[in-house]
Image (cartoon, rainbow, N blue to C red):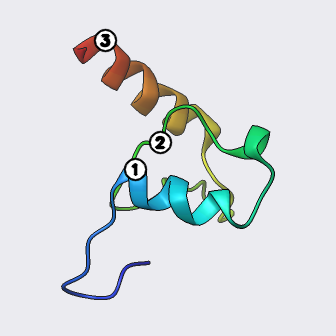
Amino acid sequence: MLVPGESLDEQDLRAHLAGTVASWWIPERIIVVDEIPKTATGKFSKVSLRALVQGREAAR
């Protein structure tokens, strides 16, 4: 979660990850969302996330 007034872009995130994890772990695409959709049990909703990604790819 970002501190109010701060911003984050893909390059900043990649730079941070480059010093933390192996290079092959850094994702090719990064999508920034306000909130990650969750199921009723609190787990990440993979169905909703896939739909979100497909919607953004169709908009390209």
Neighbour tally class for label 3: few under 14, some 14-19, many 20 plus, Cα within 10 Å:
few
> Which residue sits at x=25%, y=14%?
60
Q: Which mark is residue 58?
A: 3
Image side of residue 22 versus residue 32, left or right: right
Single out the mark in the foreground, 2 or 1.
Answer: 1
Q: Which mark is residue 10?
A: 1
Extreme left residue here?
A: 5
Q: Are marks 2 and 3 in contact (CB under 8 Å)?
A: no
Q: Which is nearer the N-term, disc 2 or disc 3?
A: 2
Q: Which is nearer the N-term, disc 2 or disc 1?
A: 1
Image side of residue 29 versus residue 20, left or right: left
Single out the mark in the foreground, 3 or 1.
Answer: 1
Q: Are marks 2 and 1 in contact (CB under 8 Å)?
A: yes
Quarter of image, res 12: bottom left
Which quadrant of the figure contains the N terminus?
bottom left
The CA span between labels 2 and 3 is 16 Å
* Residue 21 vs residue 40, the one in the foreground: 21
The CA span between labels 2 and 1 is 6 Å
Image side of residue 39 versus residue 3, left or right: right
Regarding mark 1 in the picture, which secondary structure is present there? helix
Indicate the position of residue 44 as horizontal and vertical percent values: 63, 53
Q: Is residue 3 above or below residue 18?
A: below
**Amino acid residing under circle 1:** Glu
Q: Is residue 50 above or below residue 42?
A: above
Q: Which is nearer the N-term, disc 3 or disc 1?
A: 1
Q: Which residue is mark 2?
A: 30
Indicate the position of residue 49 as horizontal and vertical percent values: 52, 38
Neighbour tally class for label 2: few under 14, some 14-19, many 20 plus, Cα within 10 Å:
few
Neighbour tally class for label 1: few under 14, some 14-19, many 20 plus, Cα within 10 Å:
few
> Which residue sits at x=36%, y=17%?
57
Regarding mark 2 in the picture, which secondary structure is present there? loop
**Amino acid residing under circle 2:** Ile
